Image (cartoon, coloured by chain):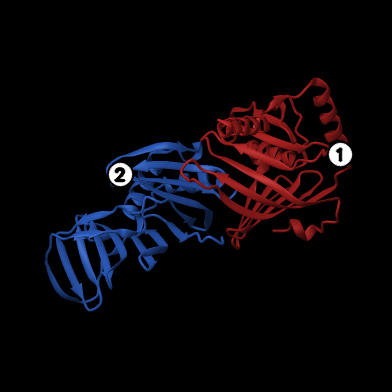
Chain colours: A red, B blue
Amino acid sequence: MKFRLSVVFLLMNLLVFAQEKAMTQDEISKLKSSVNTENAKIQTIKTDFIQYKHMDVLEEDLKSEGQMYFKTRNTLKWSYSKPVSYSIIFKDNKVYINDQGKKQTINANQNKLFEKLSGLIAGSVTGNVFNESEFKIAYVKNNTHYIVKLSPKTDAVKKYIREVHLFFPFGDAVVSEVKMLEPSGDYTKILFKNRQLNVKLEDAVFAQ
Amino acid sequence: MSSWKTLFLLSNLFLLSACGTLRFPAEVSHEKSSESIQNVYFISEKPQIFLFKLLFKDNQQSGIFVHKKTEDNRHRVVISSLFGGTLLDLTFDRENYTVNYVVEDLNKKFLLNLLHRDFSLLVNERYLSTQKIQTQTQTIYQSQQNYLVMEAGQLQQIQLVKGKKKKVQIDYTSDNGILQHATLKHFNLPVSIELDLKTENE
């Protein structure tokens, strides 16, 4: 009996641990204020990332790794080193793709959707996304993080991204984790590690 | 996403270039056959993960290709971009397919039919042969419009042929019966697909 009770308590604890609660108005105001203050100071971000792609068809998530570079305003490079070398650069309203040496350029200026998506991705990195006109926003917290849940309002964006969850560790106003949920039910989780703020990033970093 | 759209809008044009012509090395023998030939590369119920590359003219789109056999002669293929988004999720047998999910840019009947035919040819488990051709090094089985090329007991190639023209060719490279690499090439469209088995370290 004692053993069973211990198991029940353990399960209860785990549930409580994983449970999300709504943030209070005071917490929301403080988070917004600290994220906006921190954002104003950010000139560059350099960070490693690990990406987990959850697919309904697979029991284990697919893991990718790489580095992310951000330079204000909205210049962003995602560079994968595993499973293959692949980079995507959002710069000057263009998207530059280097797919294992094969280079392509997309003019995002002529594509409002790409512009919105690249803005969303850049915002996801910095946390600068409290835009009520673009997203329905929910604020929750678990035992370790504040979580901002964004649901795009634009139909064109909704076709690709159902929701974006940004995780801010308590006491830190910069995003540590992003979860992108797709209409298919699959999702991608990105964890940032070894983050360096405002280090010098040469222009060559953002050259294709 | 828009590159996919461009790719397949262009493929809609059906720019018919010259088809490949069916040729095999000198035949040693040619006889009727009713053997059952198995493609062993996609019979495991454990999901297999491949790095995927779609080549269309000068464009290239890489991604992840997951295959899972769901029941006898029924398969599921999911393709996602390297950036993370799921692009296509199809369940199919030889005759029919169900779209579990497809991004809007790829949701074209022509394209889905084409991918169903390609994937079905790639993973179909069993063929009943009607002709058997023997060359010095290869055994070639004909099964309806398909030619299956075996060498040293391993399936090396499948050709889809209409009339005397080759429409699609799949080349398999395996190691101990495990597929390492496959290339699917169209002869009437400038489209090819490459798969490389994703290893634990990748």
The residue type indicated by label 2 comes to: Asp
How many badges with numbers are in the image?
2
Q: Is residue B82 left or right of residue A190?
A: left
Q: Position of residue A204 (x, y in %)?
A: 77, 60
Dividing the picture into quadrants, the one containing residue A148 is: top right
Disc number for residue A38: 1
The residue type indicated by label 1 comes to: Glu
Looking at the image, is A40 positioned above or below residue A199?
A: above
Looking at the image, is A45 positioned above or below residue A32?
A: below
Q: Nearer the viewer, residue B57 or A81?
A: A81
- Residue A19 in view here: yes
Q: Is residue A201 left or right of residue B81?
A: right
Farthest residue, direction top: A25
Q: Which residue is mark 2?
A: B93
Instruction: Kindly identify the residue that appears in the image at 40 percent across and 37 percent down.
Output: B99
The residues tagged by marks 2 and 1 sit, at their Cα atoms, a distance apart of 54 Å
Disc number for residue B179: none
Looking at the image, is B14 positioned above or below residue B23?
A: above
Q: Nearer the viewer, residue A24 or B173?
A: A24
- Disc 2: host chain: B
The C terminus of chain A is located in which quarter?
bottom right
Farthest residue, direction bottom: B136
- Disc 1: host chain: A
Instruction: Kindly identify the residue that appears in the image at 42 percent across and 36 percent down.
Output: B100
Q: Position of residue A84 (x, y in %)?
A: 58, 60
